């Protein structure tokens, strides 16, 4: 259910001053808001462009949408969910969980929904971040970017796509007003979203054409409903759910050996995937088309029990020749075959290393984050800071991605780090702080050295894990508990900081004014009225 917000203060003519501003209301931004409240901080606001919390789980409502990480791992450690109904949760349950946590921890009044951030620019004279948004201007000492990596859909550059006259939409922008029953449908892509969508559309389409560029590795989905006894135990038996979560966590961590240390350890998963394929597809020609030509794990490993069987249906065709062009009512492949269609579902993923959001954030040298990454590649320090962007922290920044476990674990690790950073800034009355460039460079050299032998880099595939510089700016090259260890405490010596008293006069005055504002204004954002139901 949407959460309408009346934010009169955000529409004021003068910029709204806050100490900390969070961009994004998904798992990352919500977690940051909760942690700030738990630390006794109230002078912050969360800007969310959607009409509810949830981020990617609010937006991705396509048929069959579900998580491919076990349910017990896909929650905050401080707020386990005993109400999961399955071992792998469907999208509605995850969204319901996120919404319930926002209400439980009473942070909805800190959110401004329907707020599109147009630009984020550092002002060196005032040592503040200045933001222009659809709900007015903001000025903040600290900005936490929690936009995530699954927020900007990636659309294919295909000749004639703009000429198509039928219904067309991205999987993350599903048009529920369109009835696809009995239609001729094309699905472009065979990634994580597509293998969930295809079985659903295969049941209702007159004809379904699945356009595959690269065959993915698909593992069995060991999914089942939890029994009533199990669900009661999760809720009422002390420590039972935590024990289950711990067991799943360590089972998942065992995959790290194969992903990052020695690919030979991926052989059991490869054998399982090959057996899964043989059992579900008997036709040798079709089996050949869906057999990957790279090491398992090089691209994201997918899980499904009904994707392969759907491809064998008489109303479903797998097209591997590639798309030459799209016409007003058809798709022409590179072999010249034209297929008539009524609708196109684009399941081509998201902008990760080239997110459009990077172009709207400008650091102290005037360059945007996009320009910075264009020059050196997407890199940061512990996924939480980027040189030349003072007083800004990132959640799920560079090299925090995983190929085996839950991103929520990484989010919580970074939250520990950032909360400790904010406490350090307050303790020492720091006016500006940014990671040292030499520290960031050393950190990234070490990361890339570790990643060079990983299956992501050396597995023989072309994936979004790698950038045009040949680096891997997305994945974490180790165990998640290793990342937790390096983010346990904020390391001030890795940063260049300036005390408030040492700032130029205009900046020092601005800092004092914000402190005075925080001391005299109400602790709650009274003008952010939220009708939460």
Image: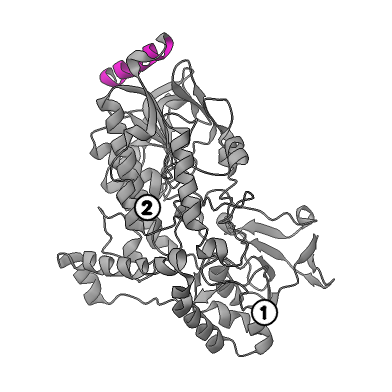
Q: Residue at x 46, y 39 (%)?
A: 440
* Spot occupied by residue 411 in the image (x, y as percentages of width and height): 37, 49
Q: Label 2, label 1: how many angstroms apart (C-alpha)?
A: 36 Å
Query: Can residue 458 be spotted in the picture?
Result: yes
Mark sitting earlier along the chain (2/1): 1
Other-residue count near label 2 (Cα within 10 Å), few / some / many at <14 / 14–19 / ≥20? many
* Spot occupied by residue 37 in the image (x, y as percentages of width and height): 27, 37
Q: Which residues are magenta?
A: 506-519
Assess whether residue 295 is covered by the magenta stretch.
no
Tag 1 residue: 289
Tag 2 residue: 410
Residue 43: quadrant of the picture = top left
Q: Residue at x 29, y 22 (%)?
A: 429
Q: Main secondary structure of the magenta part?
A: helix
Q: Residue at x 76, y 65 (%)?
A: 323
Q: Does 64 sit above or below residue 269?
A: above
Assess whether residue 515 is covered by the magenta stretch.
yes
Foreground: 288 or 119?
Answer: 288
Other-residue count near label 1 (Cα within 10 Å), few / some / many at <14 / 14–19 / ≥20? some
Count the marks: 2
Q: Are marks 2 and 1 in contact (CB under 8 Å)?
A: no
**In the drawing, does residue 203 fall left or right of residue 331?**
left
Q: Does 405 sit above or below residue 288?
A: above
* Spot occupied by residue 56 in the image (x, y as percentages of width and height): 48, 53
Helix, strand or loop at label 1? It is helix
* Spot occupied by residue 457 in the image (x, y as percentages of width and height): 55, 61
**In the drawing, does residue 375 fall left or right of residue 125?**
right
**In the drawing, does residue 505 fall left or right of residue 306?**
left
Helix, strand or loop at label 2? It is helix
Foreground: 332 or 524?
Answer: 332
Q: Does 299 sit above or below residue 411?
A: below
């Amino acid at each position: 259910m949407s959460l309408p917000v009346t934010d009169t203060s955000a529409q004021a003519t003068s910029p709204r001053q806050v100490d900390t501003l969070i961009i994004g209301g998904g798992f990352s931004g919500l977690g940051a808001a909760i942690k700030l409240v738990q630390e006794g901080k109230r002078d912050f606001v969360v800007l969310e462009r959607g009409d509810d919390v949830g981020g990617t789980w609010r937006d991705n409502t396509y048929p069959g949408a579900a998580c491919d990480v076990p349910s017990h791992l896909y929650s905050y450690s401080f707020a386990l969910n005993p109400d999961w109904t399955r071992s792998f949760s469907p999208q509605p349950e995850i969204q319901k969980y996120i919404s319930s946590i926002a209400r439980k921890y009473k942070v909805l009044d800190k959110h401004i929904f329907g707020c599109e951030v147009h630009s984020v620019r550092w002002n060196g004279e005032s040592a503040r971040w200045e933001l222009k948004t659809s709900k007015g201007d903001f000025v903040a000492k600290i900005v936490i970017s929690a936009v995530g990596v699954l927020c900007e859909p990636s659309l294919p550059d295909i000749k004639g796509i703009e000429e198509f006259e039928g219904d067309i939409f991205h999987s993350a922008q599903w048009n529920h007003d369109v009835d696809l029953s009995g239609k001729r449908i094309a699905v472009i892509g065979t990634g994580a979203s597509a293998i969930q969508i295809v079985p659903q559309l295969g049941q209702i389409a007159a004809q379904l054409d699945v356009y595959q560029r690269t065959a993915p590795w698909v593992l069995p989905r060991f999914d089942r409903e939890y029994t009533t006894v199990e669900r009661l135990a999760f809720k009422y038996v002390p420590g039972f759910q935590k024990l289950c979560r711990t067991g799943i966590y360590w089972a998942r961590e065992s995959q790290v050996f194969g992903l990052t240390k020695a690919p030979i350890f991926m052989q059991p998963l490869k054998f399982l995937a090959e057996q899964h394929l043989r059992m579900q597809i008997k036709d040798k020609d079709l089996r050949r088309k869906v057999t990957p030509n790279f090491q398992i794990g090089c691209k994201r490993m997918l899980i499904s029990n009904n994707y392969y069987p759907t491809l064998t249906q008489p109303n479903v065709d797998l097209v591997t020749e590639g798309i030459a062009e799209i016409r007003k009512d058809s798709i022409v492949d590179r072999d010249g075959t034209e297929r008539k269609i009524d609708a196109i579902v684009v399941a081509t993923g998201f902008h990760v290393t080239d997110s459009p959001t990077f172009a709207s954030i400008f650091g102290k040298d005037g360059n945007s984050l996009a320009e910075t990454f264009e020059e050196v590649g997407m890199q940061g320090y512990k996924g939480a800071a980027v040189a030349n962007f003072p007083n800004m922290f990132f959640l799920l920044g560079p090299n925090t991605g995983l190929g085996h476990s839950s991103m929520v674990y990484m989010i919580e690790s970074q939250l520990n780090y950032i909360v400790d950073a904010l406490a350090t800034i307050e303790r020492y009355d720091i006016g500006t702080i940014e990671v040292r460039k030499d520290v960031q460079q050393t950190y990234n050299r070490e990361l890339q050295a570790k990643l060079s032998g990983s299956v992501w880099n050396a597995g023989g595939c072309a994936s979004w894990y790698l950038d045009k510089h040949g680096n891997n700016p997305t994945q974490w090259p180790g165990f998640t508990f290793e990342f937790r260890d390096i983010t346990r405490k904020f390391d001030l010596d890795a940063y260049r900081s300036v005390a408030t008293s040492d700032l130029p006069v205009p900046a020092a005055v601005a800092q004092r004014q914000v402190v005075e504002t925080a001391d005299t204004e109400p602790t709650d954002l009274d003008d952010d009225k939220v009708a939460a139901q």
